[in-house]
Amino acid sequence: MSKAVLKRGWAGSLLAISLGLGLNSLPSMAATEVVPLKRLKINDVILLPTVSSQYQAKFTKPKTWQVSPKSAVYLEFQHSIELQPHRSWLQVMVNDKVIKHIPLTPQNAEGTKLTIPLPVGLLQDFNTLNFRVQQHYTDHCEDPLDKSLWTQILPATRMVFDYQPVVPKVDLGGFPYPIIDELTYSPAQVQYVVDQAASDKELQALALVNVHLAQQAQEHELKSRVVFGRSSAAPDEHAVWIGTAAHLAAVQSLAGSVGNYALQGGQWVNKQSGQPLASDQGLVLFFQAPGSKSQTVLVVTGNTDEAVLKAAEYLTLRPKASTLAGGSAEVPIGWNPPGTRTAKVPRFVEGQSRTFRELGFDIQEVHKINAPPITYKVPVVSKFHKSGGKLWLDLNYSYSPQLNPEFSSLELRLNDVSIANLPLTNPAGEQLLRASIPVASELIHPRNELVAQFHLMPDKYGWCVDNYEDNAWGKILDDSQFRVEGAPGSYLPDVGLLNSTMYPYSKADNMEGVHLAVPATPSVAVLDALLGFTTRLGRSTLADTDLRLSLSKGFASLPGDKNLAVFRESADAAALPAGAKLVWQLSGSSLMQVLKLADPNGGTISGETAELGQGAYLEQYALGPDRVASVFTASKPAGFLALGELFESDAQFETLASGFVQQASTLQNQLNPVTETRFHVEEKNAVTGNWWDAALSWVKGLSWSLIIWGLVGAFFVLIILPILVRALFRR
């Protein structure tokens, strides 16, 4: 949501709830939102080549905007000077309606700027913006693929929305809207309020609510932070208060009454019955923040910490409980989360085959001779190299009739390497073709990009073409699959897999195999890092029923059957289970530091880090063949804050590289890999290691200088020395 909306503060003014403040009587303030092409996921020039081209972008209109006719599309474009103006044109379309028809003439060939009013009557929640061209360089004997046929939409093109903020409907039936609104362009921002002495159950409730919001947000960015005690939400933040009435000072500021519930003697009482809520009976409240058209307040509370946890579980239940409606919901007495769930297939390739549909890929269809590439992001979390496993791409596809069989094909590239080129040879087209393509293990990484490029050449290509209709199309079907044969090995432990999919924490999207651990008295900075981790975890999964992650304060009794995410300050080093532990030591007079990792099998491994204990460290080691402990350590609050920002920032998180340990830097705002640690430690921790991998790890662990001197010595012994000996004997 734009920061130009109302900026009235509301902390400390919640008494207005009980006075029935009329929010619609708030004064109106106009706002402006500029949406460049980059925010529509277009990072470069839009090229429109050949005689006929079209490019489609998608945009939204938030429900909290009353868009005015002052809104516009600011268009910047250029085109080939060789185009014929009487036969060449550019059309700008919104929801398939032409809003501007522009002849392509010599006068507008370079850097042309136009302002096109946006017809607000055409706008819906989800909309399309199309750029379509028809372009010709001659009246006779035209090559439809001639290089002089082009138009470019330049990156400075943008949409500018002028609007009046509208008060959203705040109702638990629509939760988590408007906290999470997939139609907005700015990140969702949430301030959580907890007590400094919050129990482990209250902090578990905090994690559950944040994961649920992140699952609803998906690709929409979510930024959250924690404060202790009373709310101090910024104008563009929603507030979420979690805790018992006795623990939470923010709840006590509600003037003793919210709707049908009142605070009496530090307990919630139902005003109709006059009875306190039961000890395991949670309460959820949801209302508009007084004096604001954009902020809401969510309260997850109860008379005990057990009730607070029940309230969080009830709120995050999917499908929703039927009683979630209006401004409040009382958890039924004796309610417990359901004991069964509908299993969903994880959205990555592990040890089993996965269809495109299971990976979240819909049927993809492209059109015309300049068809754009179809791109798939495919995470693979198993190691196929030297593991006995094999990966196949079983592709199901179809294409249109009237293609030139000599020039038409479907090209497939994995990580910029061609893996197949399938000819499209039937002039009558095909409705269903199948191809099985082996994928070389050397090409497979945790993060992969598969590109399917249809080359749809017209049936008269190579001839002198005057006029023709380009009705070509190609389609990739969603029952295509990545087929796994054999038993691929495991990458674990590897913090780089968090980058790809949050594996292995995302194996079950209800997170039943995840345990979070924080210090006995966690600081705000530690909880901010916890929120960042759970945000990334939620955005990497799709919930179906309930959430089942667990949390503990302190490290005395961590479960032995779950993947652990441990947040600890450097003073907590001795409290961890057996495994690697971080120790900081100054390296002489150097400004660098030595990071020492205690190997479970004895000894330490050292690597240099770029900061004097300011940053945070991401470390992972094996607990078994498919379980890990990720340990997040910092000695300063700034390190935990950097860690939270890392997990919340898409751009920064994508820099998280494969390896055993990484440093989240506070100085350079980037990640610094700690070198020469991964191979040695990983093979000692991994259950599936073998002698070849160990030998390879030893070689890779050698310094470059040692390798170079070794090669020089071998050259001398094998080449130079025999020559000298032969020369000596000839004398």
Image (cartoon, rainbow, N blue to C red):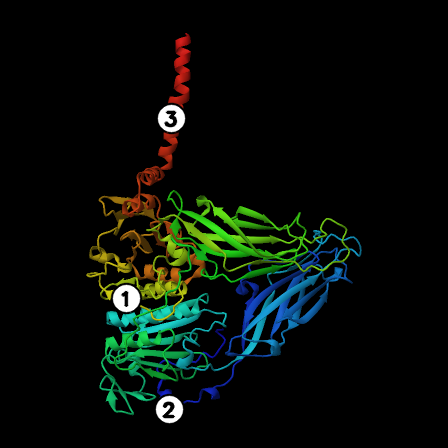
Q: Earlier in the sequence, mark 1 or mark 2?
A: 2
Secondary-structure class at tag 1: strand
Residue 646, percent from left and from top? 39, 59
What residue does disc 3 label? 714
Residue 630 in the image: above or below residue 680: below
Nearest to the observer: residue 169 or residue 167 = 169
Residue that carries the numbered disc 1 in the rendered image: 550
Q: Quadrant of the C terminus?
A: top left
Identify the residue position indicated by label 2 in the image.
19
Q: Residues within 10 Å of mark 2 (few under 14, many from 20)?
A: few
Question: Any mark on residue 154, and which?
Answer: none
- Residue 696 percent location from the top left of the image: 35, 38
Callout 3 amino acid: Ala
> Which amino acid type is shown beneath numbered disc 2?
Leu
Spatial distance from mark 1 to mark 3, Cα to Cα? 57 Å
Q: Is residue 589 visible?
A: no
Q: Secondary structure at mark 2?
A: helix
Q: Nearer the viewer, residue 442 or 258?
A: 442
- Circles 3, 2 touching at the beta carbon (< 8 Å): no
Judge by depth and name the residue closer to the eye, 599 or 292.
599
Front tag of 3 and 2 = 3
Disc 1 versus disc 2: nearer the observer: 1
Q: Position of residue 117 (x, y in %)?
A: 64, 74
Residue 146 against residue 60 in the figure, above or below: above
Decide which of tag 1 and tag 3 comes sooner along the chain. Answer: 1
